[in-house]
Structures are given as structure tokens and as C-alpha cells.
Image (tube, rainbow, N blue to C red):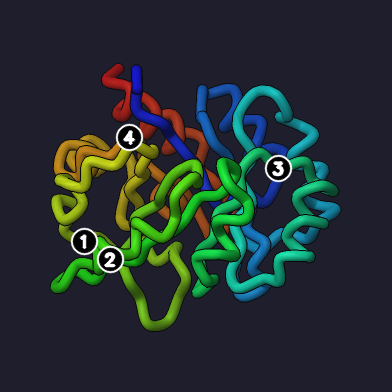
């Protein structure tokens, strides 16, 4: 991969989406889990997507949502990728093929069972985030990123959890990931992105 990918997740407004596109962000995450403070309804998500369509990749984030609902949202919003962040069975994720991103929760002390990766053949890539007992991602908690350094995956892997402008380079170096997935690390409040922080993040990741 020629340069590290930058994914900004939990975008809730057209204004923030346009800022991300203007600053060269690669992937934009729209959260469809009602339990998240960054949850967006389908109509709102469609407006956000339409404002930046063709300028970056649009990723829908889902947690234990029925497959039929995911398909309907994908079509209505016009999503490019589908990120599975819950406890979805592997066969449910695999049915979406090269559009699917599987979130893997990594225990800071014990890591994770590498064998599970063999269950997701044919998907687009993986997102590695810290395991939490009270949230499906978006915790902002750091973890030993080097735990995923030796995976040698053919698919892209993104690193998340405690990543922001100040930690992005270190996270990439330790994890040997293909990109970063950042949510709270570039926010002024939940769901509200800080344009200056996004700009710093992109600059740090791209080595500018």
C-alpha cells in the first residue's frame, strides 16, 4: 500500500464530512448502532454520504444488525464498505464479501485468537480495536499495538483505539498496520469533529 489510510469514524454532519474530504481522508465511517452517541439515522446518513460521494470511501458501522436491514441501509445510503463491530457470526460477515470489514477486539493483556482470522476469507479487511466490556469501539483507550504487528495479512488492517494526531505515527509503527481508524481522537465532543485535529492527523500519518 503506497500510503497509510486514514479513516475518520462517527461522522454525524455534512459539515464534518466535507472537512474530512477536503483534508484528504480516505474513509468516512457512519455509525448505525443506536447505542452509540455518534448514531446517525438513515436519512441523515444519506445526506452526509451525498455531500462527499466519490471523494472518499463510505463505511457503514453495524453492531448485531439483521442482514436484511444492513442490505437495505447499504442501498439507501450508498455505502462502499460495511464494518461489523458486534458479535456477528463469520458466515454473516462473509456473505458481504469484499465489501466487509471485520472488527477484531484485542485484549490488552491476552491479545486475541489469531485462528478467527481464517474464518473471514474474501472480506476487504480488518479493524483492530481494544476489547471493552461496556462498548463496541469508540472508547479512545490505548492498547499494545504491537500485538498485531506480525499477522502478515494479505488484506488491509487498520488500527484503532486511543489513536489521534499525537499517537498515530507510533500506532502505525508498532502495529505495522495499513492505516488508522480514528473517532474520539479528533473530536471536540462526541460526534463533533475538530477540523484542526483532523488536519494534524492526516499530516502526521502522511508524514507531512
- Please indicate whether residue 66 sits to the left or right of residue 193 in the image: right
Tell me if label 2 and label 1 are in contact, CB under 8 Å.
Answer: yes
The mark found on residue 178 in the picture is 4
The mark found on residue 143 in the picture is 1
Image x and y of residue 31, in percent? 63, 58
Within 10 angstroms of label 4, few (less than 14), some, or many (20 or more) residues? some
Give the structural element (helix, strand or loop) at label 2: strand
Alpha-carbon distance for marks 4 and 2?
A: 17 Å
For image coordinates 21% across by 47% down, the residue present is 151
Precedes in sequence: disc 3 or disc 1: 3
Precedes in sequence: disc 3 or disc 4: 3
Tell me if label 3 and label 2 are in contact, CB under 8 Å.
Answer: no
Alpha-carbon distance for marks 3 and 4?
A: 21 Å
For image coordinates 41% across by 31% down, the residue present is 5
User: Which residue has dot 3 on it?
Assistant: 79
Q: Is residue 179 above or below residue 141?
A: above
Which label lies toward us, 2 or 1? Answer: 2
Precedes in sequence: disc 3 or disc 2: 3
Residue lying farthest bottom? 133
Give the structural element (helix, strand or loop) at label 3: loop
The mark found on residue 80 in the picture is none
Give the structural element (helix, strand or loop) at label 1: loop
Within 10 angstroms of label 2, few (less than 14), some, or many (20 or more) residues? many
Residue 194 visible (yes or no):
yes
Precedes in sequence: disc 4 or disc 2: 2
Tell me if label 4 and label 1 are in contact, CB under 8 Å.
Answer: no
Tell me if label 3 and label 4 are in contact, CB under 8 Å.
Answer: no
Precedes in sequence: disc 4 or disc 1: 1
User: Which residue has dot 2 on it?
Assistant: 106
- Please indicate whether residue 72 sits to the left or right of residue 160 in the image: right
Amino acid at each position: 500500500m503506497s500510503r497509510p489510510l486514514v479513516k475518520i469514524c462517527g461522522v454525524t454532519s455534512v459539515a464534518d464530512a466535507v472537512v474530512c474530504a477536503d483534508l484528504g481522508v480516505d474513509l468516512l465511517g457512519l455509525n448505525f448502532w443506536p447505542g452509540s452517541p455518534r448514531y446517525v439515522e438513515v436519512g441523515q446518513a444519506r445526506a452526509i454520504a451525498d455531500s462527499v460521494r466519490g471523494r472518499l470511501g463510505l463505511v457503514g458501522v453495524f453492531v448485531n444488525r439483521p442482514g436484511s436491514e444492513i442490505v437495505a441501509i447499504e442501498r439507501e445510503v450508498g455505502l462502499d464498505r460495511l464494518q461489523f463491530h458486534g458479535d456477528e457470526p463469520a458466515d454473516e460477515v462473509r456473505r458481504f464479501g469484499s465489501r466487509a470489514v471485520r472488527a477484531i477486539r484485542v485484549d490488552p493483556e491476552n491479545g486475541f485468537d489469531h485462528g478467527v482470522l481464517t474464518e473471514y476469507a474474501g472480506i476487504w479487511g480488518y479493524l483492530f480495536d481494544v476489547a471493552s466490556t461496556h462498548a463496541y469501539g469508540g472508547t479512545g483507550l490505548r492498547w499494545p499495538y504491537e500485538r498485531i504487528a506480525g499477522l502478515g495479512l494479505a488484506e488491509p488492517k487498520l488500527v484503532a483505539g486511543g489513536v489521534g494526531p499525537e499517537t498515530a505515527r507510533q500506532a502505525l509503527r508498532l502495529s505495522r498496520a495499513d492505516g488508522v481508524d480514528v473517532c474520539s481522537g479528533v473530536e471536540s465532543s462526541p460526534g463533533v469533529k475538530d477540523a484542526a485535529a483532523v488536519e494534524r492527523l492526516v499530516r502526521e500519518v502522511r508524514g507531512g
